Amino acid sequence: MSTTHILVVDADSERARSVTQRARSDDWSFAVSTDASSARREIDSRPISLVLADASAWPDLADWLAQAHPALPAVVLSSRQDEGPAVMEQLRLGAMSFVPRDADRRRLVETIRTILELNRRSPHRAAIRSMLRGGAVELQLTNDPALVPVVVGYFQRILEDYGLTGPRELMQIGVALTEALANSIIHGNLEVGSDLRAERSDVFYDLIDERRTMEPYRGRVVDVVMRISQSVASFVIRDQGKGFDRAALPDPLAPENLVKPSGRGILLMKTYSDTVSWNASGTEVTLTKVMKP
């Protein structure tokens, strides 16, 4: 029996049941609460690993969750009618990410699995923090998306050594790095477009698997450099794809783009990093995070 429990919070019990059916897995179990009060009781009474809160329920739950359970991640189930300011407010209130409440099974499961992986942290190693001054790490990744959580977890442990403030902030930079690395592998090296994810089929994932074995894609790599001091951490991620025109990127906060898979990653990268910048060709992105004592 799974020991990973996920709580879905939504006043519409049928809608909540639909989410649990689409996202069912042997790796986790679900509970459903129809309001913030019952959600608080559920969270206080059993070990919950993740909260999936409908956009309508999230504001009533967010403040309490931040105070009482700051390490518990939440994902907002957004409406396709939600506009940019509404989603930004959901993230400001502490949501780790968002996904359309009517998203297909694969997208829901992918989102849940990503956030759960980011929340699996090693114990603090506080004794060594006063000795650390700075350093750099260089990694080279092949085009296997399964490497992304491994690399992000490694970077999170380094950030934890340096005392990045709080588990929630550690998860947030983990979300940003996950999106940046996945973009470099999937959209950069493998040249698989996000538009295919909107087709509600496996064509997006099938094309990833196919191109990982084909030239010129399979020989490409992603180079990652992390530089860290007691004041700032930076991550330079460079792929060997064709790049992209940043000026042509659609505004991810525009209502017509908000729930599309394309642009969502860049929105999360910008939300959870202090600065995000690209080189002229779009093959290299740099994320920086100011360290807080």
Image (cartoon, rainbow, N blue to C red):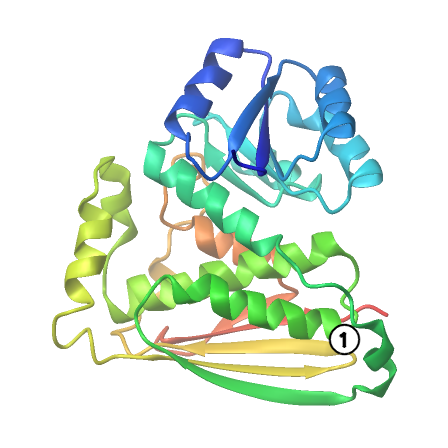
Left/right of residue 34 with respect to residue 17 in the rendered view: right
Question: Image point 44% across, 39% down: which residue?
Answer: 258
Mark yes or no: residue 86 visible: yes
Residue 126 x/y as whole percent: 84, 72
Mark yes or no: residue 253 visible: no
Question: Image point 66% across, 35% down: which residue?
Answer: 48
SS of the residue under disc 1:
loop
Left/right of residue 234 with respect to residue 160 in the rendered view: left
Question: Image point 47% across, 10% down: which residue?
Answer: 14
Residue 188 vertical position relative to residue 22 in the rendered view, above or below: below
Residue 58 vertical position relative to residue 192 in the rendered view, above or below: above
Amino acid identity at mark 1: Tyr
Residue farthest along the left direction in this orientation: 215
Residue 16 x/y as whole percent: 50, 18
Left/right of residue 246 with respect to residue 136 in the rendered view: left
Question: Image point 73% across, 55% down: which residue?
Answer: 167
Residue 235 x/y as whole percent: 55, 76
Q: Quadrant of the C terminus?
A: bottom right
Image quadrant in which you'd find residue 174? bottom right
Image quadrant in which you'd find residue 254? top left
Q: Are there few (<14), some (14-19), or many (20+) residues within 10 Å of tag 1?
A: many
Q: Which residue is mark 1?
A: 162
* Front residue of 272 and 67: 67
